Image (cartoon, grey):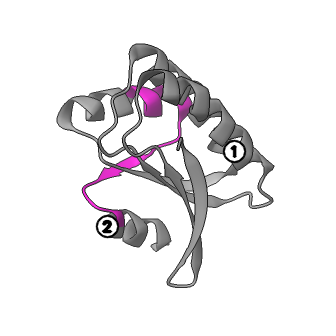
Amino acid sequence: MGARIFQENYKGKKIYIHDFHGMSGEELLRDIPLLAKETLSKTDKAQLIVFDVTDGKASPKAVLAFKKAAADIRPVTKKAAIIGVTSLQKILLNSVNLISSLGAKPFDSMQEAKDWLIRE
């Protein structure tokens, strides 16, 4: 099916879910730039975003693509959360955050991520 973005209204706030669930390798390389472009096309300039990478496997090239995409969407992102990262992937997330200044925070569940996003 591929990655997709969908919008959810959660406790009166608009949250964008970037769904990369179960994706790896070439799928990620194909879809990461497309979702970044779609994010930039939205009229919202202070987006709340959850990245769902549950059961995914990022290659070194995919991590580089995430770094570039994160830097590209940073100007339109108010807060970002990520779910589905393992211990090793948290190290890669630190690298993405360092390069992009996105500051995506890892969470164990979608509920925790959304609750954190809507806190001012």
Give residue 75's mark: 1
Any magenta on residue 102? yes
- Asked if marks 2 and 1 touch (Cβ < 8 Å), the reply is no
Secondary structure under the numbered disc 1 in the rendered image: helix
Secondary structure under the numbered disc 2 in the rendered image: helix
* Residue identified by numbered label 2: 112
Counting residues from the start of the chain, the first of labels 2 and 1 encountered is 1
Q: Which residue does the image show at 30% across and 47% down from the upper left?
A: 84
Residue 100 location, quadrant: top right
- Residue 114 in percent (x, y) is at 42, 68
Residue type, numbered disc 1: Pro
Figure check: 15 above or below 2: below
- Label 1 packing within 10 angstroms: few (<14), some (14-19), many (20+): some
Any magenta on residue 51? no
Q: CA gap, disc 2 to disc 1?
A: 24 Å
Q: Which residue does the image show at 46% across and 43% down from the upper left?
A: 20
Q: Which is in the foreground here, disc 2 or disc 1? A: 2
Figure check: 100 above or below 102: above
* Farthest residue, direction bottom: 12
Q: Nearer the viewer, residue 117 or 42?
A: 42
- Residue 15 in percent (x, y) is at 56, 66
Q: Which residue does the image show at 67% across and 36% down from the upper left?
A: 34
The residues colored magenta run: 95-110
- Residue 112 in percent (x, y) is at 31, 67
Figure check: 115 above or below 72: below
- Residue 93 in percent (x, y) is at 37, 33
* Farthest residue, direction left: 87
- Label 2 packing within 10 angstroms: few (<14), some (14-19), many (20+): few
Figure check: 111 above or below 60: below
